[in-house]
Amino acid sequence: MPRTEFISTGFYVPDRVVRNEEFTQWMDTSDEWIRTRTGIRERHWAADDQATSDLALEATKVALERAGMKASDLDCIVFATVSPDYMFPGSGVYLQRKLGIANIPCLDVRDQCTGFLYGLSVADAWIRTGQYKRVLLVGAELQSVGLDLTTRGRDLAVLFGDGAGAAILGPTDDPGRGVLSTHLYSDGAYAELLWCNLGGTANRPRLSAEQIEQGLHWPKMVGREVFKHASTRMPASVHEALKVNGLTKDQITVLIAHQANQRISEMVQKQLELRDDQVYNNIERYGNTTAASIPIALDEYVQSGRLKRGDLLVLTAFGSGFTWGSAAIRW
Ligand code: COA
């Protein structure tokens, strides 16, 4: 059975840079609070004429060009997002349409910040069994239009940013390379600790002016609980990935963890006892871009030239659900 390799990667963030200071015009906060609690200095926000699939399209164009491929070469699209263009259909078909292709499957993955890893796991299984040979895996988010930009929503609003990362995946016959394993977990007992109440079918009425008045359409989070779970579950899933493959932490070339909060990433690094050169973080410039954070960081790292063939790349994520997981990849 072949393994899955990353043929190329690409990312895109919108032009508008929103620095921490800007938030002080909308809410009671400060650059100092945001920087010291989260490590974030700035994030990118989409323009009014952009939807999530537009961000994904730009990231995809970069990945296709680097792969020397045309959109028509793709066999399948896997699109991970928590902020889709519309309630339905999923953003995958919009990306497909914008790429000018048809008649290939589009799978939308909604596993929040762990979406890219869930998508990777599915794409990997399809590629290994030979069902599809060229899979476009995208994580894209447009969070800025879904944030409560008042003091009521300040804990969440300052965290999130917009952006997209793409990877083109395919089979490799080189037995030493590719995705070694993926490890996925979830626990719905914690669903309401990071969630958005409104818009689904559990409420009667489904949507009312009164509910909106109450702010039920904004995402809500119990930050401390999320922090606690994220900083323990990510290292645990990395340990699992190492153990299954008979590897040790010293063999990790780079760990790219979902960029939720710099302090969480530091806790993960500490628990895994990794050196600074074994981790890559970029939350300072992009904030938390949910399903896009891993592919954006991965592409930045790849473009920096630091990831060489045969290196061990480990990915890990944690997010709403709760969902979490890891992947070990021989580059
Ligand atoms: N600016 C200023 N003050 C803020 C603020 C902001 N943007 N957001 C919250 N605060 C206030 C709180 O209201 C609270 O005030 P109080 O003590 O008067 O009640 C105070 O800061 C401390 O809040 P607390 O929630 O205890 O802070 P914290 O140290 O836990 O940090 C988070 C808050 C959100 C940064 C932190 O909990 C966190 O990062 N959690 C994980 C979030 C995450 O990664 N989510 C996505 C996961 S995929």
Image (spheres, rainbow, N blue to C red):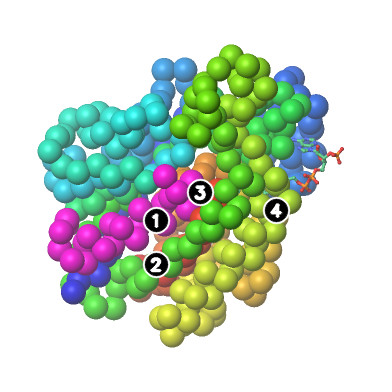
Under tag 2, what secondary structure? strand
Q: Sequence-wise, which precedes: disc 4 or disc 2? A: 2
Q: Residues within 10 Å of mark 1 (few under 14, many from 20)?
A: many
- Amino acid identity at mark 2: Thr
Task: For ligand 1, tell me if the residue under mark 3 lies within 8 Å.
Answer: yes
Residue ID for mark 4 = 225
Please report the bounds of the magenta region as a residue range: 110-133
Nearest to N terminus: mark 1 or mark 3: 3
In the image, is residue 260 part of the stretch drawn in magenta? no
Where is residue 281, by image quadrant? Answer: bottom right
Q: Earlier in the sequence, mark 2 or mark 3?
A: 3
Residue 114 location (% of width, % of height): 47, 53
Q: Which residue is more in the foreground, 89 or 205?
A: 205
Q: Mark 4 falls on what kind of element?
A: helix
Label 3 CA crowd tier, 10 Å (few <14, some 14–19, many 20+): many
Q: Secondary structure at mark 1?
A: helix
Label 1, label 2: how far apart the Cα atoms are: 8 Å
Cα–Cα span, label 1 and label 4: 23 Å
Where, by quadrant of the figure, is residue 140 drawn? top left
Q: Which mark is residue 182?
A: 2
Q: Which residue position holds label 1?
A: 118
What residue did someone put label 3 on? 113
Q: Based on the picture, tell me whether residue 125 belongs to the magenta stretch.
A: yes
